[in-house]
Every structure is written in structure tokens, then in C-alpha cells.
Amino acid sequence: MESTANTLIPQAPAQAAPGERDTVLKQAELDQISRDMLGVIADMGEDTPGAINIRANGCLAARTNSENIRIETKADKPGIDIRVAPHTKGEQVHIPVVLTETGENDMVYNDFYIGEGADVYIVAGCGIHNDGDCASEHDGIHTFYLEPNSHVVYVEKHYGEGDGTGERILNPTTEVHMQEGSSMEMEMDQIKGVSSTVRTTRGELAADCRLTVVEKLMTHGDQTAESDLDFVMDGDGSSVRVVSRSVARDRSRQLFQPVVTGNASCRGHVQCDAIIMDHAQVKSVPAIDARSTEAQLVHEAAIGKIAGDAIVKLETLGLTEEEAEEQILEDFLS
């Protein structure tokens, strides 16, 4: 039996996949910048439970399996297969990516196989530290296969930092295939510092499946963010709930394009709430497509500025206007 508590040293060596660099680092060799970003994007510290796979600058940095979760390197392309045994309960998986070299262009294909009746918590995410003048980019293609009555909580965080002029680009794709009675909760956060992102999320739901997707992001400067979501409910009793909460500052631009299709007796709800500031632009184009008389689909969108009376109220409590504004934004995205 393998331990479910992991320190900064992997329990067993791992091999690089085709397309990855041949070098396999030890997690203990990661620099402080990478360690700090792991805390931001994956809530990882010195003692992180469950199965772990860390990718750093195109290399496999560390891997540890747990008793019921196996992580295997793909044989044909860069990426991993994560296999969760049926009826696994209460275990965690952490699969973060960090880039600290300017000009890095990294793409991975990660497939998740969630066994029948399993219930797991999965944390992904990417952090880019770019001090140079060349763009650094990570594109992750994640595909989930949920067997009947399984449940997944999936958290994905994106973060950029560094003093260089090079862009920090993140283009994630997430696909979810859900069998009868399965459920999934997805939280997709863009914390700050990402120059541009195009997030593509798709899902197919069988009978009695439930999917909740919550996106939270902030853009500033000249950053751009696009979210393209497409969910299809094919089974009776299925439901989809999509919530987007965003803040656009400076000259940044955001585009939110969710599509929910109901092919059965199902429920769908799409909600977009955005705060726009300075000279930013926010565009929301929600679409609902009912192809059954039993489908019940709703969409709503609201875009506006911070209410002046909210700032005044906080100023009466001793905050400056700037502090009040930041507090409101923090509460909005929490």
C-alpha cells in the first residue's frame, strides 16, 4: 500500500513521455519561484495528500501514486492518464504545471478515467513566471470520462507573474463525458497576470447527470480572455448550471460564449455577472437550445460598474476609496 501523504520528494522515479524533455527532475530540485507558484495554483505545500504529478518547463518534476489512483505517462504524446479505481472515496489528485523559462511552449494531453461510484477531488492549474521578452505558453487538453454514479470536484487555477515583457498565454481545453448518474463540479479561476487566454469547455451528459461550472476571472492592462462553453444534455433528469463572475479593468477585453443544449427532459441555467471598469470591454453571448418540449433552459447576464453607494458605505467604515473598491472586487470574485 502506498502512502497518501506526499513530501517534496517523489516515492518512485518517473519516465519522460515522447515529446517531453528527457530530463526528469526531482520535486525537491524545484526553485523557490516554482514552489511558491505551486502554493498559488494548486494549494500545495510540504505535505500534500493523494496522488501527485508536477510538470515543470516541459519536464516531469515529480510523481506519486496513491492506493487507488494511478498516474501513467502516455506512450504516444506528452501527457498523462489518471485512473481512479471504482468506489474510491475521499482521495485527492494534484497535477499542476509551472513554467519559469521565457519562450517556453508547452502542450499536454491529460485523460482522467473515473471509476464507477468514485468520489474524488482533483486540482489542476498552471503558473507562468516570465522575466524575459519572449512569450511563454501552456495549452492543456484535459478529457474526463466519468463512469456511472461517480462524482468529481475539479479545480483549475491560472496565474501569471514576472517582470518581463513576454506574454503569458494559457489556452486550456476541458472535455467531460458523463455516464448515467455521474456528477461534476468545476471551478475555473484566473487569478491574475495572464496576458491572453482562450478557454474551451465541453460536456456531454447522460441521464440523471449533474454538471456545475463556475468561472471566476480578472483581467487588467491589455489582457484578453475568451470563454467558449458547449454542453449537451442527452439524458432525462440531467442538469447543467454555468456561472461566470468576472472583473475587467484598464483596457482589457472579455468574451463569454456559453451554449447549453437540451435534448431530453432536463434543466439548464446560464448566468453571467461582470464588473466593468476604466476602458475595458465585456461581451456576453449566452445561448440556450431546446430540442425537447421537456427541456427547461434559462440564461441571464448582467454587466455594470461598481455601485457608488457601496463605495461610500465602506468609506464610512474607514476605508479609502481605493481600499473600498478592492474589497468590493474581492468579495465579488470570492
Image: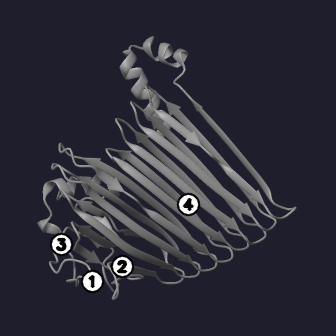
Q: Amino acid at mark 2?
A: Ile
Task: Please indicate, yes or no, whether residue 143 appears anywhere in the rendered image.
Answer: yes
Judged by depth in the image, the label closer to the viewer, 2 or 4, is: 2
Judged by depth in the image, the label closer to the viewer, 4 or 1, is: 1
Q: Give how far apart the Cα atoms at labels 3 and 2 are.
A: 19 Å
Location of the N terminus (image quadrant)? bottom left
Q: Amino acid at mark 4?
A: Glu
Mark 3 vs 4, N-terminal side? 3
Which residue is nearer to you in this view: 329 or 297? 297
Q: Residue at x 18, y 45 (%)?
A: 164
Q: Give how far apart the Cα atoms at labels 3 and 4 are.
A: 30 Å
- Estimate the x, y position of residue 40 in percent, counting from the top left: 30, 51
Mark 2 vs 4, N-terminal side? 2
Please give the residue where the numbered disc 4 appears in the rendered image. Answer: 185
- Estimate the x, y position of residue 314 in percent, counting from the top left: 46, 17
**Residue 9 numbered tag:** 3
- Estimate the x, y position of residue 288 in percent, counting from the top left: 72, 54
Mark 3 vs 1, N-terminal side? 3
Q: Give how far apart the Cα atoms at labels 3 and 1 are.
A: 20 Å
Mark 4 vs 1, N-terminal side? 1
